[in-house]
Amino acid sequence: METMTTNYLGRIEGHRDLIKLNISQMQALTREIRQYILKVVSQNGGHLASNLGVVELSVALEYVFDTSVDRLIWDVGHQSYTHKILTGRRDEFDSLRQFRGLSGFPKRVESACDPYDTGHSSTSIAAAVGFAKARDLKGEKHKVIAVIGDGSMTGGEAYEALNLAGGASSDILVILNDNRMSIAPNIGGMSNYLNRIRTSRAYQMSKFNVRSFLARVPVVGRPMINGIEAIKESLKYFMVNGLVFRELGFNYYGPVDGHNLENLIEILKQVKEIRGPVLLHVLTEKGRGYTPAEDDAAMFHGIAPFDLSTGKTNPSASRVPTYTQAFSQKLLELAEKDERIIAITAAMPDGTGLEEFRQVYPKRFIDVGIAEQTAVTVGTALALEGLRPVVAVYSSFMQRAFDQLIQDAAIQKAPLVFALDRSGIVGEDGPTHHGAFDLSYLSQIPNMTVMVPRDERMLKEMLEAAVLYEEGPVALRYPRGRGVGRLNYLVKENLCWGKGQLLRPGQDVMILAAGPLVYQALTAAAYLEKEGWSAGVWDPCFIKPLDAKGILELAKSCRTILTVEENVAAGGFGSRVAALLAEQKPPVPRLACLSLPDTFVEQGSQQQLLQELGLDAQGIRRACQSLLRQTTPGFPEKGSGKRNGRISDDGEGK
């Protein structure tokens, strides 16, 4: 990497500072920005390859447009690092993705230059149409720009918005950032279409040589030059098999080199003056300027902290597999025995653990692109034809297919499996990626089974049971990160459909903990035992169907019950238990529910956030103490009196 000899970056707080630089100074600035991004991401982790690829494009956009006034919407948003650095957040950038630090995505609360929060893909064009309409209704004059990647063009909302924008003649600029690769290789017709545009040598030659060619044609050459733009568009239409964007009502320009800063600025100045919908097709390279990221853009899409000199991440000393790896291993094992198993992903084969499946069973693997709705519907049809599809999607991404979960899968009782990775608290990606709602939105759907494994061993056992289940769809939700490893104090009984498991008996308080929080609950129970309390732990295993008989038996044998879950309270596991107990007569033991708060949880490490939310062992311990305090005269005299933290008057642990 080139040594930084200037400090143009230290001078830039926004558009007004940027326009004072000449081209050579801005080119030096791009080098400084790349080094800064590399330094911070190598320390904090983050989305690297995509951000290195849009440095010149970002600088050009901030130069031509004043994003404190103009509306610039970054699709997905993980490629907005340069934008953040150039819009007054340079000095905060080293807190990127850290607890209470700068978000890895655009955030309205951070800056007026972020008009729209984006964490999921394919939304920017629709948002731009809305901003443009609001501008026109208010009689304002600013520009509206949407930057969308070619990977996001596999999402249906992008096409809906293109159709709307072109039909309404919205005055917007859409930048198609074509880096020829999203997280996984792009699939489908649009990817093939864009590839034809990029690689059509005949079109590229005609675009630049048509004027000189016509000038040499006797008699008719000069008159034809007067209609050269129409001829160029006709040639373009013919040579790239149709101008899809023009047919949708857009003025199409490109493709242009996304790393030629001077040319980018001139083109952006020109299209800025055009009224109506404009699409500028820009070609960029993921990982630009950092060889390891250029060579392996997929690995550097989202990367953990790494050694900047080698590009290598720090190897984990743990040999415990991640939940994703455990899922992948078991699915391969099942697929070897059962040819009916089909794996489906929505542009995330690597992140969901399906990459090896794709390599081993390519004919039984389907990548639908960034289209979770399509994944559910395709899977439903396969299931109805007697196959066993497993749809692997991140929990927060599956929210986009809620209608299809109901209308397609559940109503028809289609026997397919939804493997929901990244459920619960996911960490540094923050509120757009936490799987905080899946227990709520899945449990309310008739015919849907919801399973929550406490560890990687049970994940494998549940996956096998789910694939064999024929009565309807099954959702299997599991977290990000490594499994538990040695299972020291757990029973060895096999999974029984719809039944929970008692892991530790107790009479004073029974902790009903869903998923890996079982282990935090067991630690909390051990602390409480040292204080003189009899604390038990029960794993529901199934959130739906709920093991009503098992819970009611527990209610007869203990004085208080605490439910614990990585899900919002409304509609979650605790609320289902509360509803069950409320129906019983005589009155049941006192119940409290510990869950995610009714707010969007910000970013931070999983450990930090669980501690902050009171969902770690000490938080569960305090919640139990609070519950016992309300039901035990003279508390805490019965126990040892050793208490961490303070219990407020309202019974909530602080």
Image (tube, grey):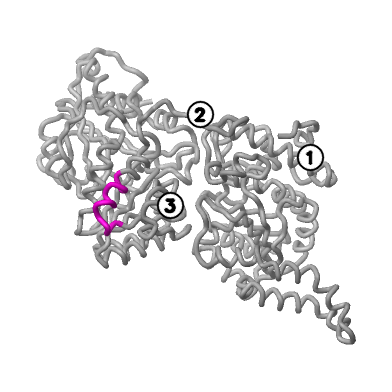
Q: Quadrant of the N terminus?
A: top right
Give the x, y percent position of residue 589. 16, 34
Tell me which numbered mark, 1 or 2, is placed earlier along the sequence: 1
- For label 2, the crowd category at 10 Å Cα-Cα, with few meaning under 14, some 14 to 19 and many 20 or more, is few
Q: Which mark is residue 314?
A: 2
Amino acid found under the numbered disc labelled 3: Phe
Amino acid found under the numbered disc labelled 1: Ala
- Tell me if label 1 and label 3 are in contact, CB under 8 Å: no
> Residue 326, located in which quarter of the rendered image?
top left
Q: Which residues are magenta?
A: 330-341
Q: Nearer the viewer, residue 639 or 299?
A: 299
Task: Tell me the SS state at disc 1.
Answer: helix
What residue is shown with label 1? 28
Judge whether 584 appears above or below 562 on screen: below
> Residue 270, located in which quarter of the rendered image?
bottom right
Asked whether 332 falls inside the magenta stretch, the response is yes
From the viewer's perspective, is 385 left or right of 118? left
Q: Quadrant of the C terminus?
A: top left
Q: Which mark is residue 397?
A: 3
Residue drawn at point x = 57 percent, y = 48 percent: 77
